[in-house]
Amino acid sequence: MKKKLYNETIYRVLIIAIAIFSALFVGAILLLIAKTNPLKAYYVMFTEPLSGKFGLTEILVRAAPLMLVGLGIAIAFRSGIINIGGEGQILIGAIFGTFIALSFPDLPTYILLPFIFIASFIGGAIWGGIAGWMKAYLSVNEILSTIMLNYIAFQVYMFLIRGPMIDPKELSYGTGVPQTALLSKNAWLARIIPASRLHAGIIVAVILAILVYIFLWKTTIGYKLRAAGAEAKAAKYIGVNVKNYLVLAMLLSGGFAGMAGAIEVCGVHHRALESISAGYGFSGIVVALFGGLHPLGIIPASAVFGLLIVGADMMQRSVTVPASIILAIQGLIILAIVSSQIFFSNIAIKEKIMIKLKLMKPGDKDDS
Amino acid sequence: MILDFIIGIISAGIPLAAPLLLAGLGEMFNQRAGVFNLGVEGIMLMGAFVGFLVVLTVGSPVLGLLAAILVGAIMGLLMAVVTVKFKAQQGISGIGLFMLGWGLSGTLFRVYVGGITSIEGIKSFSFPLLGKIPIIGEIFFQNNILVYLTFMLVPISWYVLNKTAWGLKVRAVGTNPQAADTLGIKVERIRFQCIILGSMMAGLAGAYLTIAQTHIFADNITAGRGFIAVALVYFGRWKPVGIMWGTLLFSLAHAMQRSIQVYGINFPYEIAVIIPYLLVIVVLALSYKSQLLGPVALGKPFIRGSRE
């Protein structure tokens, strides 16, 4: 029995490794087209962030928002909804949190910070909830609605930080950079390693990941949420109001992305500015998929993609290929991971390969 | 004054509809065969960039359009392998393809072009005599050649889908792939063909933006038009004429939003830009009942021998 589990794991790791390798292989061709030596580029991308304090702390700085967005996306996926709206939910969360921070600058940190996080959760939850409600009650395709809400959120966000919420200094100096005023120090997340940008947000994110795990796997609501996603019809028979759970999932999903916005505001920039999200809404999808849609898988997955994003920035400096190539590589990784699912879900294919690899004897039954 | 305003909106709206219509008709073939291709946005971005680059370096708009179609075909092939061969979840695959197209077009633009440069591209022309007719001439006879070709694709697509043997197969595959399979229709082959055809049209739609409309390329230049085209397929109930009305309604709203800005009506720019996206959501919400009319097998991978 143990041996079987062991072989299963080998098979799983092997398939995922092949998938990632294929994505990186195609990525190498793209790098060649972008006039870059792929080996050198990948070498810098994967090793340079690990070679010093700066790189290591930066990985965790990126991992914190990725983890939160990834958790939100996993909650949605687990309940059968594809939330592509992370980007918009981050922005709305960021602006809600910033609004609270600017309105109550004198509150002590231990009151102000939770207040900000709750506000940004609510902001993101509203933005996600709209899509969830429209999916449940108007059958509006949630992928399309969340994408449209991304574009809308970006414009609303830019309108606010360019107009009503702009830093008064930007107006008086006449520079007009679209950003809000600097938050009071009470709203800052503490730096946990001196002389780096690493802040307490990463700890918050890990705690939340564990809470999401408990919620999804150890509570009745979490169970019903997953049931609604795994088999909506069957869930109805055991008395789950699938529609309400759909909305709940999107509220939570958006809320987590919203908190990622607060983490960026309070932990990194200390104000709301134009490039607050840096594509975390989309990278979060890769993190969630790579983490197996499981909170405890998402913790390491967010570090892996934190590494890739920091690595891409370093690559831009030393190999001079634009960092935007990482977006394309992440797209390839998504394609590779979703393609690899067939090797787990299709038992016939799985048995055939496992027998070929001598991980299984012909005649053994796969009862996983 | 009012008349000028209205004519201005209509004559600006019609050419804006062309890229949406091209991508939308392509997506219609995808979806009628049962495949939801959200990668359209990424394919359009790649088409827009490659078309732009070819015109910039070689100077020939025709070659630019052909190159964009080729790139569309390659990305369509990738999408087809992932969703048809590997039977991957179609929505997420589309997002992967979108990120691929977005990241790659932005990267290659920085590597090969660098900054904002404009190209000659395709210009609109006025029909002799017809273009001189007041109002009608301005609205219908002063566009670029691609606008006319695109609108001609509406009856052609209708004919192909409803009156040819291949169109019948496409509809069968999208409605009941199991039954189609027992009749000897090669389900996977038809889906491959539809995805690649749709993606070629998406590539062309992207190239339209850079070669015939804006004459420049910028990062993320499509600004969601690919996704909007997908939404308009729902609105148009998977029928060419319906999709055409959807794209026209949409691009007129777009043109109106622009005119509001041009006429200096006091309205925050960002709020005006929201209107088209808001309209898509409203349109999707209003057309929810029509989803029942959609291809039954939409979004479901075909697994031979399965009962669903």
Image (tube, rainbow, N blue to C red):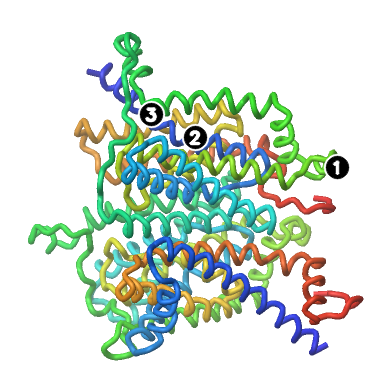
The one nearer the camera, B263 or B138, is B138
User: In the figure, A196 relative to B27: above or below?
Assistant: below
Query: Would residue A235 be seen by someone viewing this image from the given angle?
Result: yes
Mark 3 residue type: Pro
What crowding class fits label 2: few (fewer than 14 Cα within 10 Å), some (14-19), or many (20 or more)?
many
Location of residue B120 (image quadrant): top left
Disc 3 on helix, strand or loop? Answer: helix
Callouts 3 and 2 on one subunit: yes
Q: Would residue A110 appear left or right of A363 to someone viewing this image?
A: left
The one nearer the camera, B61 or B186, is B61
Disc 2 on helix, strand or loop? Answer: helix
Asked whether disc 3 touches disc 2, contact meaning CB atoms under 8 Å apart, the reply is no
* Residue indicated by mark 2: B22
The chain that hosts pointer 2 is: B
What crowding class fits label 3: few (fewer than 14 Cα within 10 Å), some (14-19), or many (20 or more)?
many
The x and y percentages for residue A348 are 82, 66
Location of residue A276 (image quadrant): bottom left
Callouts 3 and 1 on one subunit: yes
For the point 43% across and 65% down, the residue is A32
The x and y percentages for residue A361 are 87, 80
**What numbered label is drawn on residue B15?**
3
* Residue indicated by mark 1: B182
- Report the Cα–Cα distance between label 3 and label 2: 11 Å
The x and y percentages for residue A86 are 46, 61
**What numbered label is drawn on residue B60?**
none
- Report the Cα–Cα distance between label 2 and label 1: 33 Å
Mark 2 residue type: Leu
The one nearer the camera, B203 or A68, is B203
User: In the figure, B253 relative to A82: above or below?
Assistant: above
The x and y percentages for residue B104 are 42, 58
The one nearer the camera, B234 or A96, is B234
